[in-house]
Structures are given as structure tokens and as C-alpha cells.
Amino acid sequence: MEIKVFRSKEGLAQAAASHAASLMREAISRRGNGRIIAATGASQFEFLDALIRIPAIDWSRVEMFHLDEYVGMSESAPASFCRYLRERLINKVGLKRYHLLDGTDDPAAVIKRVSEEIRKAPIDVAFAGVGENGHLAFNDPPADFETDEAYMVVNLDEDCRRQQLGEGWFPTLADVPRQALSMTIRQLMKAEHILCIVPDARKAKAIQACFGGDVSPLAPASILQRHPNAIIYLDQESSALLPQTKVEAYAS
């Protein structure tokens, strides 16, 4: 794992997007197609905007998998992550091969269908964020580091639900779902490369917990410390509580 800190979230986003594009082009050149995992949430806004603007990515050869979605969530709802990915990535680049998690379908059927697809070939690069409670995808603490399943139904803790409320996705806490479909920790860790994009001061405590200490299910994203090709992209605010000895600083 490597940690990189940038002066601004825009500089962070551009650097992460450039690296992502390079990895995708390399995979397409090597194997004829690239397989990615896309994250959602407010932390990914600038990154995805930068990524779709980078030229010379053959999106017709990219296959995308989805990290998580609320159980029972219709794609027409403002908080739907399926809707988010269609509006911010799929429709913008004309992506043809993608596997969304349908929150309104039977969870077992969705898990079976998407798990079969993701296991067909390696994932070249996964994009991820870190929750305010340290979660990775919707694996809240204490996270399951052991399951071999690719996806599972998880219960969302109150800190996670309050984050979704605070980001403006829901009008009240009562409206935030209590369960979600989530990619598992082990499945995410199978990606050849992981780019973890985490700007903003509200993530500083989670970053300190996950990357300033030991690996623990109580700090789910700390597992990225064990991935040989994980890069954590931070801005000055999200990195504020980390020891400077743990990071590389960039001017952007």
C-alpha cells in the first residue's frame, strides 16, 4: 500500500484519474479488455468527472462491476447508486458492459448473477472510497474479512446511515435503508490494483484509524494495508491526522 497526499481534492482527482486511465489502457492492450470496479458516493464526484474527460480510453472494451446498493432501492430514487453510475459514468462514456446491483430484485438472485460474472476473469483495477466509520464498500465495522462470497447482504450501522443523511442523499435518518448489497472485502482485495479516493476533512478520523495503525475489522479499510498495489489518494484535509512519515506529498 502507498499513501499519496495532494493539496486539493481536484489535484487528487486528476492524479487518480490519470493513473486509472493508464491501468485501463494497459489492461486493454494486454488482454483486449479491461475490467473495473466502480465506487459511488460524494467522495467520487471529482474523480469520476476527471476520468470521463481523459481521452483515448476505449470504453467499448471496458467491463464494469458495482460495489454496493441499498436493498429495496429503486433506480429512479435520487439515492440509488445504480442511478448514480448511469448518470456519472455509464451514460457519459457509452459503457456497454456493466453489472449493476438491482436493489429491487431478490437479493439472493442478484448476488448469484453478479457473482458468477465477476468470477469469470480477474479485475484489473478497483476504485473505492472509505466511509466515515472506516467502511470499505458497505462492509461496516466489524467487517467480515473471511467470507469467500463475492457479494452479500449487510446491515448498515448508524454511523454509516448518518453519513448518507449528511451527504444529502436522504431527507431523514428514518429514510436511510438498513440493509445493502455489498461486495465483500475478499472480493475487492482480489483486484490487481486498488485506487482508494478519499478527500475531505470529515474522513480524517477514519483515515487515521485505517492507515495510522494496525489492520483490524474494526477499521475495515485498514485491510488495504495488505494489498501490494493499493494507492490511497488523500487531500490535505483527509490526511491531517496521519503521521507525516506515512505519506508522500504532492503539489497538485
Image: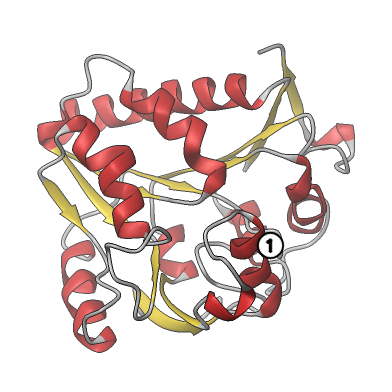
- Position of residue 79 relative to residue 240, above or below, is below
In the rendered image, residue 16, in percent from the top left (x then y), is placed at: 50, 28
The residue lying toward the viewer, choosing from 2 and 114, is 114
234 shown above or below 171: above
Q: Please, which residue is most extreme toward the front here?
A: 171
Is residue 148 among the parts visible in the rendering? no
Q: Position of residue 77 (x, y in %)?
A: 35, 64
Residue at the image position 17 percent from the left and 25 percent from the top:
29
Give x and y (percent) for residue 187.
39, 66
208 displayed left or right of 160: right
When asked about the image quadrant of residue 59, the answer is top left
| Secondary structure type for disc 1 | loop
Q: Which residue is mark 1?
A: 134
Q: Is residue 178 left or right of residue 102?
A: right
- The amino acid on which the numbered mark 1 sits, given as a three-letter code, is Gly
Residue at 21% across / 70% down in the picture? 114
Residue 55 position in % (x across, y down): 26, 14
The correct choice, above or below, for 15 with respect to 129 in the image is: above
The residue at 88%/32% (across/down) is 244
Q: On the picture, is 164 further left or further right than 63?
A: right
- 28 and 166: which is toward the camera: 166
Q: What residue is rendered at 32% in x and 26% in y?
A: 52
User: Considering depth in this image, is 233 or 199 the residue closer to the camera?
Assistant: 199
Quadrant containing the N terminus is top right
The colour mode here is secondary structure
> Quadrant location of the C terminus?
top right
Q: Count up the numbered dots.
A: 1
Q: Is residue 187 visible?
A: yes
Q: Is residue 242 above or below residue 222?
A: above
